[in-house]
Amino acid sequence: MPQFRLFLDSDHLLTGSSPSEAKFDLSRDICNVRKVHVKSCTFANTFSNVTSPANIIRVSDGPNSYYVIIPEGRYKAETFAPAVNTAMQAIINGYSFVALNTTKNALDWTLPAGMSISGLETTACGVLGLAKINYSGTFSTDYFLGHPMSIAFECNGLSDHTYTVTGTSSNLTSKPFLHVPIRSGFGTIETYIPPTPHVINCSKTNLSHLFFRIVDPNNGELIHSMRNWQLQIEIETSN
């Protein structure tokens, strides 16, 4: 059966698209696509571990309510606690709200009297280690800066299944055709070659262009800090 091999590079996108929402026009139409074989995927690990919309702390101070925003970025433990503390100081300048406990590898919080944090309305619970309860006074949380743990490639023309991402503000429907674990450190190049043949059945799809979304499979959100990636696929067609 006829086969085509595509080398897709995020450096060669259609105008107006981006590495996280990438559009490609094919030089010719590929008709009656039966199967797609993913051969390899390479990308730069430039991912932020604190991103919008999962970077908001909901704070109440008596009759006043605040939405404290942690700046998006790539944090280590030593830089994360000061960034959260600085963001919280928009409420009370100079007050020490949170500090890194290096012995327990946790965040130690001290909120002023009358102030509370709503875990239910805080979107940054994952990175801060907050449960869906109200917090006040002195407490500790186990932060988590390991996001994202993997990335997913979505493309309507190359998907053969759908799953629902729950636990978000609204259940999101995702259609990834490739799920790639992240094993390399920040700032390095990751190359993923499927350990077993990764085949997508396409039911005689016709392809003239491809539109990819690169998302965090944990929450279905776009990974806006995606910078560079390459994908090699083989397309099998019927006569």
Image: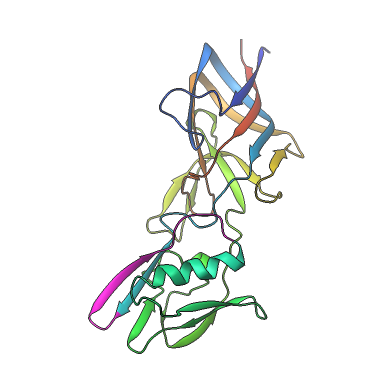
Left or right of residue 236, residue 164 in this image: left
Establish if 163 lies above or below 69.
above
Q: Residue 140's image quarter? A: bottom right
Q: Residue 7's image quarter? A: top right
Q: Measured from the top left, where is residue 62 in percent x and y?
A: 26, 84
Left or right of residue 14, residue 158 in this image: right
Magenta highlight on residue 79: no
Q: Nearer the viewer, residue 44 or 203?
A: 44
Q: Measured from the top left, where is residue 56 in percent x and y?
A: 39, 64
At x 47% / y 75%, what residue is drawn? 131
Q: Measured from the top left, where is residue 80 in percent x and y?
A: 54, 66
Establish if 14 lies above or below 48.
above
The residues colored magenta run: 61-75
**Residue located farthest toward the front when viewing the structure as drawn:** 94
**Residue located farthest toward the left when viewing the structure as drawn:** 63
Q: Quadrant of the C terminus?
A: top right
